[in-house]
Amino acid sequence: MPAITATAPGKIILFGEHAVVYGRPAIAVPVNEERARAIVMADPRGQVGEIRINAPDVGLETSLEQLPEDQPIRAAVEGVLSELGIARPPACTLRITSTIPISAGMGSGAAVSVALMRALSSFLGHPLSNAHVSELAFEVEKIHHGTPSGIDNTVITYAMPVYYVRGQPLETLRLPEPFVIVIGDTGLPSPTALVVGELRGDWQMDQDKYEALFDSVAVIVKDARATIENGNMGALGALMNQNHEYLRQMGVSSPELESLVEAARSAGAAGAKLSGGGKGGNMIALTDDGGAVEIESALRDAGAVRTIVTTIEESKYIQTDA
């Protein structure tokens, strides 16, 4: 039985993080430059039903049954087996690697789940549809994030720029004009579940304040969608800056993120904001092809531990099955 490989991209949220948990829209795009990879290989020496897990990036080398029941990799594997009605799969080894920074707001957990689910279901002879993969990955996201919005598993599964509203049908974005995003990593973990939980507590204490902030973000997201789909990229940077200000008012920024955002703007970025959970992780800056190098340099000087440049353009994305 040949080895089966599947990959999944990272992601960034362009607009709408946190507000998306409360039913407002968000825009997210895949980052193909960083990917998770899963390889499933038959193990002729193993016993039927035995699955070995090899994830060197996180120091994991064990059998599936030795992992805790709520461990995300185990949950993803068992989700596939349950979906396919397979109690005792052929003995195999599952190797997982990823270049996506962990706990940085780029969807590393969802990407691992998606790559794993695709590789394993194909190895078992029943490749899962995108809809099933996204649904199963969402269940694993609950382990990672507590109360996830569903945007990570969606944009990563479909590998398309998405306009996402929780509980509503998937909408993809048209991209008549390409644009360049520079990603700056603070190097600090972004504990999404913790930040979302803290914001939930703040919302419960002052719902009027936070509902107004979420409504303001929703307006920006809708304007950003129109701006992107109309090819009016000159207005996009100001919307990013406005979105960042609302995130600051929500209390999810940090001194490290503020330093990188300010450095990017001072280096000529049209707009910059934190991306993802906040309190660490990544920020993003909008520029053109000619400005990326200078912004990367400014971000590194301001403390970024790594930078990634990604071009958001129609030709990079291929429609897949629904």
Image: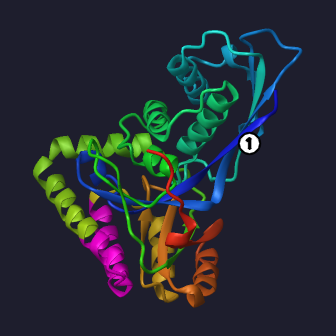
In the rendered structure, the answer to whether residue 296 lies left or right of residue 50 reads left
The one of 206 and 311 positioned closer to us in this rendering: 311
Identified at 59% across, 53% down, the residue is 9
Identify the residue at the far left of this view: 208
Asked whether residue 282 is in view, the answer is yes
In the rendered structure, the answer to whether residue 258 lies left or right of residue 97 reads left
Quarter holding the C terminus is top left
- Residue type (three-letter) at the residue carrying disc 1: Asp
The one of 263 and 219 positioned closer to us in this rendering: 219
The one of 224 and 306 positioned closer to us in this rendering: 224
In the rendered structure, the answer to whether residue 258 lies left or right of residue 170 reads right
Q: Main secondary structure of the magenta part?
A: helix
Spot occupied by residue 159 in the image (x, y as percentages of width and height): 52, 54
Q: Which residues are magenta?
A: 223-249
Spot occupied by residue 146 in the image (x, y as percentages of width and height): 40, 34
- Disc 1 secondary structure class: helix
Q: Is residue 225 magenta?
A: yes
Quarter holding the N terminus is top right
Q: How many marks?
A: 1
Measured along the vertical axis of the image, is residue 149 above or below residue 260?
above
Measured along the vertical axis of the image, is residue 305 above or below residue 42?
below
Identified at 54% across, 20% down, the residue is 84
